Amino acid sequence: DTMIEDKTDLDWSYPNIVLTLSADGWGGPWGKISKYNSFMDEQTRFTAFKLFYRWDEPLMTPKEALGIDGYGEGAFIEVTPNLVIYQ
């Protein structure tokens, strides 16, 4: 919640623009899922999850990234992202 400074001062009056919180970091699925789940909850209106072809090992499947399938023994995305970014 401290990542966005002066959050209360944001101008929310643009009807076609919404804030999307994105979990952006490279690494293994366990760490990425854990960090995403700690940042996002049902109160977060729009969420995104970023995957890196080059640096994520192993690269999560689309179903894992959406929380449809878990990774390994029960590591699930808890809030389905509105956007999955592949870089």
Image (spheres, rainbow, N blue to C red):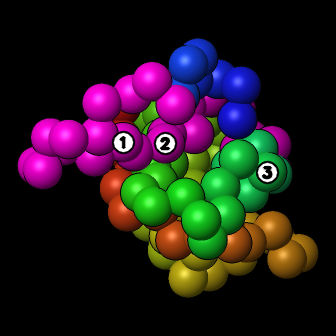
Contact between labelled residues 2 and 3, with CB atoms less than 8 Å apart: no
Which is more foreground, mark 3 or mark 1? 1
Badge 2 marks a residue whose secondary structure is strand
| Relative image position of residue 59 (x, y in whole percent) | 56, 48
Residue corresponding to mark 3: 38
Q: Dot 3, crowdedness within 10 Å: few (<14), some or many (≥20)?
A: few
Residue 10 within the magenta-colored segment of the rendering: yes
Q: Earlier in the sequence, mark 3 or mark 2?
A: 2
Q: Quadrant of the C terminus?
A: top left
Left/right placement of residue 51 relative to residue 74 reads left
Tag 1 or tag 3, which sits nearer the N-term?
A: 1
In the image, what residue occupies the spot 59% across and 65% down? 43
Q: What residue is disc 2 on? A: 21
Give how far apart the Cα atoms at labels 3 and 1 are.
18 Å
Please, what secondary structure does the residue beneath circle 1 have? loop
| Quarter location, residue 28 | top right
Residue underneath mark 1: 19
For the residue pair 72 and 48, the one nearer the viewer reads as 48
Q: Residue at x 56, y 19 (%)?
A: 6
Coordinates of residue 74 in the picture (x, y in percent) = 85, 77
Q: Which mark is residue 5?
A: none
